[in-house]
Image: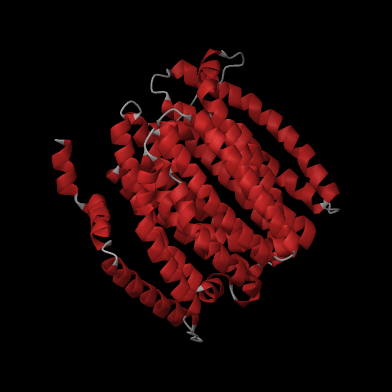
């Protein structure tokens, strides 16, 4: 796992750096309204991608004994599925254009339609590459795709293609991934395919599929409702704040979570080992996210100005509020992979259903408040509640271990987090230069964190986390 994390760390950070540079430029070329319109339309393309997967990718990783002929039959099914979803997508964007009374949604949808088909075809080879733990190749592929598409989209934005420059990026990414996948991992299409392997994996993938649908709508309802009630410009501002909040997860938990299921699934019959790994990884997520969340909460103006520019000041407060959900979201990000490795996708669905209801109810309350800040506040509260629900199902239902024993692990770190957030919120510090201000505030948070870790005698736990990540000799000895 350590080797996979290091490989994924390098590739993920390379991609994130490129994405940050691209967003840095695009935020200064395009308006919040343009970003808002694209954010709304891409919600529906991403939703159809859930149908294109249907949990099949996860099942391919979980089932180690699938033969090549089984894989070819599953791939053949996705080809037909891609055609159907492409047609459905055209109908959806037509409906969206009617609801929002803007024909631009239909035009953008036509440009995005090929990406729906190609991403459906990419699902099986993507799963196979992860199953075979070809993390280096996946990392190189993702970096090249992001870099090439980023250059092209910036050129289009400079040439005045407005919304189209953003949606073309999605289409080009799908096309490059398709070419790469079927050059490196060719699969055979059968005009008449066998349903047997599909029936076999649907018992596992079905609940995963239902969870993905529920979870997706729960996590995107806020942007849709903000766009419908407050306008596309507000949707663009809110979406930028939300996506910026997710960057820490992309940059850290995104390094670990993609390789969790391929690696942990090898221990699916050894619950004790799997539980020990879960707790260790949870500690890593918890200690790191506390620091990142506090930095974001303390420095929202500096981060927004550096990445997006002065035109996005309205995103500062929503981002500041949403940053308090970084801890719970990063810790939650490993839960799905753990339950998948246990083969308990039904539990994922049950906990996801309760969590989705909680999130949607909180979003409705936030919308009733009438501001982006009220929406952000309720979304933040929702994710905090969802954290405790999700881990109850993981620890108590999944592993059959006393939930209160797990809660003891979180008491001191969360108490430290509350103190840090309180101090960061009350400390009067204003420096005009955004770069210098961010540096000073990060140093203050770092010093405060170390002091609190020492006072609460948690410094040794952090050292153990560091040793878990870097002590290769001990790892090698344990393996022997």
Q: How is the image coloured?
A: secondary structure
Q: Where residue 19 sits in the image (x, y, percent)?
A: 51, 59
- Front residue of this view, candidates 38 and 149: 38
Please, is residue 305 above or below residue 344 in the view? below
Q: Where residue 424 sits in the image (x, y, percent)?
A: 46, 75
Q: Where residue 66 sits in the image (x, y, percent)?
A: 43, 19
Question: At 58% across and 14% down in the image, what residue appears?
Answer: 193
Q: Where residue 429 sits in the image (x, y, percent)?
A: 47, 84
Question: At 46% across and 50% down in the image, what residue appears?
Answer: 144
Question: At 35% across and 42% down in the image, what residue appears?
Answer: 278
Is 77 placed left or right of 7 in the picture?
right
Please, is residue 147 above or below residue 419 in the view? above
**Residue 356 appearing in the image:** yes
Is 182 placed left or right of 476 in the picture?
right
- Report which quarter residue 373 is drawn in: bottom right
Q: Which of the image's four quarters has the N terminus?
A: top left
Q: Which of the image's four quarters has the C terminus?
A: top left
**Residue 133 appearing in the image:** no
Is 366 placed left or right of 11 in the picture?
right
- Report which quarter residue 222 is drawn in: bottom right
């Amino acid at each position: 796992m350590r080797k996979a994390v290091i490989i994924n760390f390098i590739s993920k950070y390379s991609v994130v750096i490129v994405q940050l540079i691209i967003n840095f430029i695009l935020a200064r070329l395009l308006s919040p309204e343009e970003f808002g319109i694209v954010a709304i339309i891409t919600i529906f393309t991403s939703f159809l991608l859930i149908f294109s997967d249907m949990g099949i990718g996860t099942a391919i990783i979980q089932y180690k004994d699938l033969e090549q002929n089984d894989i070819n039959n599953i791939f053949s099914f996705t080809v037909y599925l891609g055609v159907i979803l492409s047609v459905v997508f055209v109908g959806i964007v037509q409906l969206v254009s009617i609801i929002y009374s803007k024909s631009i949604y239909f035009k953008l949808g036509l440009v995005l339609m090929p990406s729906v088909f190609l991403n459906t075809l990419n699902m099986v080879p993507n799963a196979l590459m992860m199953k075979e733990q070809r993390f280096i190749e996946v990392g190189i592929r993702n970096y090249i795709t992001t870099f090439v598409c980023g250059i092209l989209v910036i050129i289009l934005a400079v040439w005045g293609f407005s919304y189209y420059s953003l949606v073309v990026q999605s289409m080009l990414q799908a096309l490059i991934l398709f070419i790469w996948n079927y050059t490196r991992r060719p699969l055979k299409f059968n005009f008449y395919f066998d349903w047997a392997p599909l029936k076999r994996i649907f018992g596992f993938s079905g609940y995963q599929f239902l969870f993905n649908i529920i979870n997706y709508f729960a996590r995107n309802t806020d942007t849709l409702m903000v766009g419908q009630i407050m306008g596309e410009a507000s949707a663009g501002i809110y979406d930028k704040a939300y996506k910026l909040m997710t960057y820490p997860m992309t940059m850290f938990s995104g390094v670990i979570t993609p390789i969790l299921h391929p690696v942990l699934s090898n221990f699916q019959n050894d619950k004790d080992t799997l539980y020990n790994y879960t707790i260790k990884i949870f500690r890593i997520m918890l200690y790191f996210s506390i620091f990142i969340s506090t930095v974001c909460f303390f420095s929202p103006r500096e981060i927004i100005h550096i990445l997006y520019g002065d035109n996005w000041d309205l995103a500062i407060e929503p981002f500041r509020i949403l940053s308090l959900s970084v801890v719970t979201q990063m810790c939650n990000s490993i839960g799905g992979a753990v339950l998948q490795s246990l083969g308990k996708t039904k539990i994922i669905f049950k906990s996801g259903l309760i969590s989705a209801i909680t999130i949607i109810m909180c979003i409705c309350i936030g919308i009733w408040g009438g501001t982006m800040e009220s929406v952000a506040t309720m979304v933040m509260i929702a994710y905090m509640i969802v954290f405790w629900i999700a881990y109850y199902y993981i620890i108590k239902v999944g592993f059959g271990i006393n939930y209160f024993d797990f809660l003891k692990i979180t008491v001191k770190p969360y108490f430290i987090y509350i103190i840090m957030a309180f101090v960061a919120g009350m400390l009067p510090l204003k420096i005009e230069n955004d770069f210098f201000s961010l540096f000073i505030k990060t140093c203050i948070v770092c010093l405060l964190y170390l002091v609190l870790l020492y006072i609460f005698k948690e410094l040794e736990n952090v050292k153990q986390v560091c040793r878990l990540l870097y002590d290769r000799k001990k790892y090698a000895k344990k393996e022997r």
